[in-house]
Image (cartoon, rainbow, N blue to C red):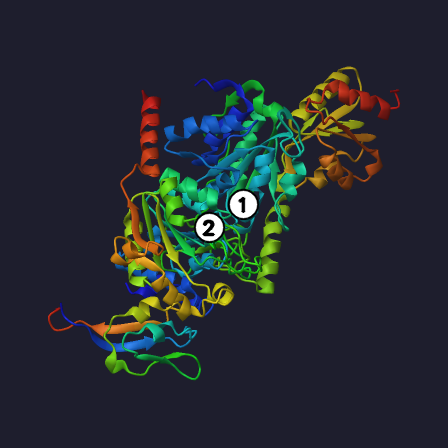
């Protein structure tokens, strides 16, 4: 059978990935540059018996998908900077109440209304710390449409596995650029479905008592088990508690269930990394320029490689440290003021040899932009 | 329609917070607050089984148990 | 089933103050559900934040205690994804009409089959007695020491204008009427709003010289009158009680089912 090959936007590749992963419900609000995700899903979801709703605002969209997730559906929303800010309180709710959901943030320039139709990667830290209070979060990204598809599938899988919101941090270039996507056959990529409780009717069900492996089997609203879901600290039945022991244990569980699985969650790619003296650490659309430069210089005999990060949170500290251990210098290539740079500096043994190659003017960083800085670091003049 | 007959006015003293709503609005003054600010049925014989105390109680602490009169089953 | 079977008795006595009208509204609601003989597994109660929102912890339904003002948005997700569920959304003044005002008018506009219960006590109780958008002018509150100058919403008029297909009002005093209105609202297909005037003796009654719970209930009795009653005709300044809107309109989830049918047909042809 012929593979399904499409030529489409990154936002559409995200939609294809979501459909493949089994999305049932989408709630959203129009915002550039993510709107195509809502548009395509408004068309595709009802074709599959799924539901699409355009809500009255960004906050409502986030809340609606949480409500739908509780009835057993795979859910997602999509937004960009200002909308992502508005969603933060409800994202924290999903963290606290451990409700699987996927949020695609197609990044544009900020702060505030910023640079709506231009690219940026300025929301990396917001994805991590946007909502208040201690918590952990998963954030994935991609530099091409095949990976956008795959990371979207992964996002749904991880949301179900860890019962957490998962953030897809795409950017305007990825979202709007058109390129080829080969849609995998059914069964080619693993799909994680919701883990449902096997506790029978009328037997005490503990919705918030983790199994030994840390997973929490769910029961759908409308099912046999009636329990409580709250954003307050809660006991194993989901009822509010401020008992210090319960508060302490729950918060640790929320952080540990993700941070202790950083290896399983980590997604990355290596490009020309073998024996590289200069390593470009990058992600999203800026990784495309980094990869282009590395491949180009390799052909000329220079030992330059790229470590492309596809999972940004939890940050793959060990991976970065290990991969960059023998590098003469590390350049973090990103389109912000150094949000991943901070993480890389904290990860490596020699933070003084970590440099930032960035662009923050709404234009895609180019191989030449990176090369200029690289030449200085290499001591080859300005 | 048959008249309801009172079986018992059940008061959950643990739930009652002594607001006095039932006492004030009982049409036949069946209820009073005791020294601990909990409601007691002091004149159950006057109860007309309107159940307004049960319905209006903000603490859901009152249940008026009744029996249907002869004509109903 | 008995009324108690709809409660999570282990959490009683509840956390509301003595004489709080919210307890009476809970009482009316469980009586309504009991009289309708609804299956507990098919009811989802979604609440926001505040004194009112704690109601969802006390009922033995599926319960979703959400964020301040967002209950209707969460509820919309629940209902649209599983339209067979009965979705009840009790809200306080702030949840319904301050921080949550936008969700209120839009849920009404969609006419999605949700029952919104506005527990109107004209005050923010949980945070200690600040005025609300339902307080109205001339009210004393901890954030209005010189009395309020803010006008209040008329919940009924707002719900009507926004497109709710069932709109009613009663009070905690008129508990039988409240129960009947709640029953009708729950059975109504479409967005239903029941405003129930509630009393907060702790924060509103004391500050505004309305007395204790008993005194406040007396005011609910004397300040309101049934729609179409002589009392209301004679004294139009009274707050009307009863059913203001009850009409059949296309319901959101049913309309969406038609979209699904259309989309599937387009795909298969």
Q: Nearer the viewer, residue C90 or A79?
A: C90
Q: Nearer the viewer, residue C130 or A355?
A: C130
> Quadrant of residue A333 in the image?
top right
Q: Is residue C96 left or right of residue C260?
A: right
The residue tagged 1 is A90
Q: How many marks?
A: 2
The residue tagged 2 is C152
Q: Chain of mark 2?
A: C
In the image, what residue occupies the spot 59% across and 51% down? Answer: A254
Separation of marks 2 and 1 at Cα, in angstroms: 28 Å
On screen, residue C86 above or below A34: below
On screen, residue C151 above or below A29: below
Badge 2: few (under 14), some or many (20 or more) residues near its Cα, within 10 Å?
some
In the image, what residue occupies the spot 43% across and 59% down? Answer: C55
**Residue most extreme to the top:** A300
Instruction: Tell me the quarter of the image containing the N terminus of chain B.
Output: bottom left
Tell me where residue A196 appears, x and y as whole percent.
43, 48
On screen, residue A285 above or below C87: above
On screen, residue C102 above or below C223: above
Instruction: Tell me the quarter of the image containing the C terminus of chain B.
Output: bottom left
Q: Is residue C63 left or right of residue C236?
A: right
Residues at marks 2 and 1 on the same chain: no
């Amino acid at each position: 059978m012929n593979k399904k090959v499409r030529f489409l936007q990154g936002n559409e590749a995200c939609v294809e990935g979501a459909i493949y992963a089994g999305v049932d419900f989408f709630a959203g609000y129009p915002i550039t540059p993510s709107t195509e995700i809502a548009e395509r899903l408004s068309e595709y979801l009802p074709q599959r018996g799924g539901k699409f709703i355009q809500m009255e605002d960004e906050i409502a969209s986030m809340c609606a998908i949480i409500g739908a997730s509780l009835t057993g559906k795979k859910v997602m929303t999509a937004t960009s900077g200002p909308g992502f800010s508005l969603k933060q309180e409800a994202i924290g709710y999903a963290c606290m109440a451990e409700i699987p959901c996927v949020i695609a943030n197609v990044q544009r320039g900020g702060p505030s209304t910023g640079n709506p139709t231009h690219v940026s990667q300025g929301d990396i830290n917001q994805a991590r710390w946007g909502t208040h209070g201690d918590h952990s979060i998963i954030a994935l990204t991609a530099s091409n449409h095949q990976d956008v598809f795959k990371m979207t599938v992964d996002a749904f899988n991880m949301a179900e596995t860890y019962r957490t919101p998962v953030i897809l941090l795409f950017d305007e270039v990825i979202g709007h650029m058109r390129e080829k996507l080969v849609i995998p056959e059914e069964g080619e990529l693993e799909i994680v479905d919701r883990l449902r409780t096997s506790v029978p009717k009328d037997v005490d069900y503990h919705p918030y008592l983790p199994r030994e492996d840390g997973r929490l089997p769910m029961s759908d609203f409308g099912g046999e088990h009636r329990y409580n879901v709250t954003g307050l600290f809660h006991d194993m039945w989901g009822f509010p508690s401020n008992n210090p022991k319960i508060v302490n244990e729950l918060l640790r569980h929320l952080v540990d269930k993700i941070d202790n699985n950083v290896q399983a969650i980590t997604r990355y790619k290596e490009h020309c990394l073998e024996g590289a003296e200069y390593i470009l650490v990058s992600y999203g659309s800026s990784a495309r320029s980094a990869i282009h430069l590395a491949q180009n210089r390799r052909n000329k005999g220079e030992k330059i490689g790229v470590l492309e990060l596809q999972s940004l949170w939890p940050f793959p500290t060990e991976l970065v440290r290990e991969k960059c251990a023998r590098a003469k210098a590390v350049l973090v290539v990103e389109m912000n003021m150094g949000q991943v740079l901070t993480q890389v500096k904290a990860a490596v043994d020699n933070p003084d040899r970590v440099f930032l190659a960035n662009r923050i003017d709404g234009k895609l960083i180019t191989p030449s932009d990176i090369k200029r800085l690289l030449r200085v670091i290499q001591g080859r003049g300005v | 329609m048959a008249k309801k007959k009172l079986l018992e006015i059940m008061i959950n003293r643990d739930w009652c917070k002594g607001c006095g709503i039932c006492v004030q609005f009982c049409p036949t003054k069946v209820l009073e607050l005791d020294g601990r600010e909990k409601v007691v049925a002091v004149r159950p014989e006057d109860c007309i089984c309107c159940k307004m105390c049960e319905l209006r109680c903000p603490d859901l602490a009152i249940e008026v148990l009744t029996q249907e009169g002869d004509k109903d089953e | 089933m008995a009324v108690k079977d709809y409660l999570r008795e282990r959490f009683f006595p509840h956390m509301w103050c003595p004489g709080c009208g919210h307890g009476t509204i809970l009482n009316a609601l469980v009586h309504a559900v009991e009289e309708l003989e609804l299956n507990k597994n098919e009811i989802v109660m979604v609440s926001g934040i505040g004194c009112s929102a704690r109601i969802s912890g006390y009922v033995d339904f599926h319960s979703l205690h959400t964020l301040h003002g967002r209950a209707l948005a969460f509820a919309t997700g629940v209902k649209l994804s599983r339209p067979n569920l009965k979705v009840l959304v009790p809200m306080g003044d702030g949840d319904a009409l301050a921080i949550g005002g936008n969700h209120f008018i839009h849920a009404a506009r969609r006419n999605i089959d949700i029952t919104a219960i506005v527990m109107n006590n004209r005050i923010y109780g949980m945070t200690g007695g600040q005025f609300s958008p339902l307080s109205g002018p001339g009210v004393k509150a901890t954030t209005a020491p010189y009395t309020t100058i803010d006008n209040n919403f008329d919940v009924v008029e707002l719900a009507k204008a926004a497109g709710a297909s069932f709109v009613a009002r009663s009070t905690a005093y008129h508990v039988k009427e409240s129960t009947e209105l709640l029953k009708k609202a729950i059975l109504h297909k479409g967005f239903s709003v029941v405003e129930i005037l509630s009393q907060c003796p702790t924060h509103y009654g004391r500050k505004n010289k309305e007395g204790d719970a008993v005194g406040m209930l007396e005011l609910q009795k004397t300040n309101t009158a049934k729609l179409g009653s002589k009392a209301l005709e004679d004294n139009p300044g009274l707050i009307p009680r009863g059913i203001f809107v009850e009409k059949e309109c296309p319901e959101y989830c049913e309309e969406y089912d038609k979209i699904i049918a259309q989309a599937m047909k387009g795909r298969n042809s």
